[in-house]
Image (tube, helix red, strand yellow):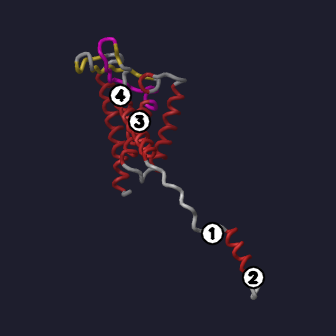
């Protein structure tokens, strides 16, 4: 992997973080908490909420749990990205998206104690939980990662196994037996 290829992953991560933080700052500056405006009729709204839970409003444990969990997840992803630095681009791209999203939401947790969400999708009263750019990046990265895992699994299952070839190298016991058989021969035999 060249330095330029490695920088590509960092650039993708940085773009996700920048887009996420810029949109959240814009929403925080222009909206009141709970305010909602229609962008594409009822299908897409911008609704400013602060989410103390996980992505899409999932709540487990306290707010410090999520901050610690997000920080640890970010570190693990960075380590794993380093370990797969020679892998093909789709694997690194998926983790760059996940990392960018994790960092974006982690910044919110440290700065505000909760995550700013504003993308509100649905029809009438059937709405998806409000989310943000970081959540979208994590979700897209996970879909790519799952597709890669499933594709590789199918690829390896489709490849026929080659039959085992007998070893042509003598084992140490064979060499020992050969040495014994040549030493035990007498000149007359």
Instruction: Determine the secondary structure under disc 4.
Output: loop
Taking the view exactly as shown, the residue that stands out farthest to the top is 125
Q: Residue at x 31, y 18 (%)?
A: 122
Using the numbered discs, state the Cα–Cα distance from disc 2 to disc 3 in whole angstroms. Answer: 70 Å
Residue 101 position (above or below residue 123)? below
Q: Of residues 37 and 159, which is closer to you in this image?
A: 159
Disc number lying in front (2 or 3):
2
What residue would you read off at disc 4?
Answer: 132
Contact check, label 1 and label 3, Cβ < 8 Å: no
Measuring from the top left, give residue 155's x and y in whole percent: 41, 45
Dot 3 alpha-carbon crowd within 10 angstroms: few under 14, some 14 to 19, many 20 or more = some
Dot 2 alpha-carbon crowd within 10 angstroms: few under 14, some 14 to 19, many 20 or more = few
Q: Residue at x 33, y 38 (%)?
A: 18
Disc number lying in front (2 or 4):
2
Contact check, label 2 and label 4, Cβ < 8 Å: no
Contact check, label 4 and label 1, Cβ < 8 Å: no
Contact check, label 2 and label 3, Cβ < 8 Å: no
Measuring from the top left, give residue 143's x and y in whole percent: 39, 35
């Amino acid at each position: 992997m060249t330095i330029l290829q490695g920088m590509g992953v960092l650039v993708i991560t940085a773009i996700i973080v920048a887009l996420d933080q810029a949109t959240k700052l814009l929403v925080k500056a222009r909206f009141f908490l709970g305010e909602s405006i229609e962008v594409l009729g009822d299908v897409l709204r911008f609704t400013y909420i602060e989410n103390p839970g996980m992505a899409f409003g999932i709540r487990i444990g306290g707010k410090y749990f999520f901050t610690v969990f997000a920080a640890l997840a970010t570190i693990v992803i960075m380590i794993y990205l380093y370990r797969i630095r020679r892998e093909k681009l789709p694997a690194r791209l998926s983790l760059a998206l996940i990392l960018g999203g994790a960092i974006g939401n982690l910044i919110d947790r440290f700065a505000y104690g909760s995550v700013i969400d504003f993308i509100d999708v649905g029809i009438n009263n059937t709405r998806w939980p409000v989310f943000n750019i970081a959540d979208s990046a994590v979700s897209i990265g996970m879909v790519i990662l799952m597709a890669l895992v499933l594709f590789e699994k199918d690829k390896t299952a489709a490849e026929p196994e080659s039959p085992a070839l007998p070893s042509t190298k003598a084992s140490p016991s064979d060499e020992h037996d050969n040495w014994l058989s040549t030493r035990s021969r007498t000149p007359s035999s």
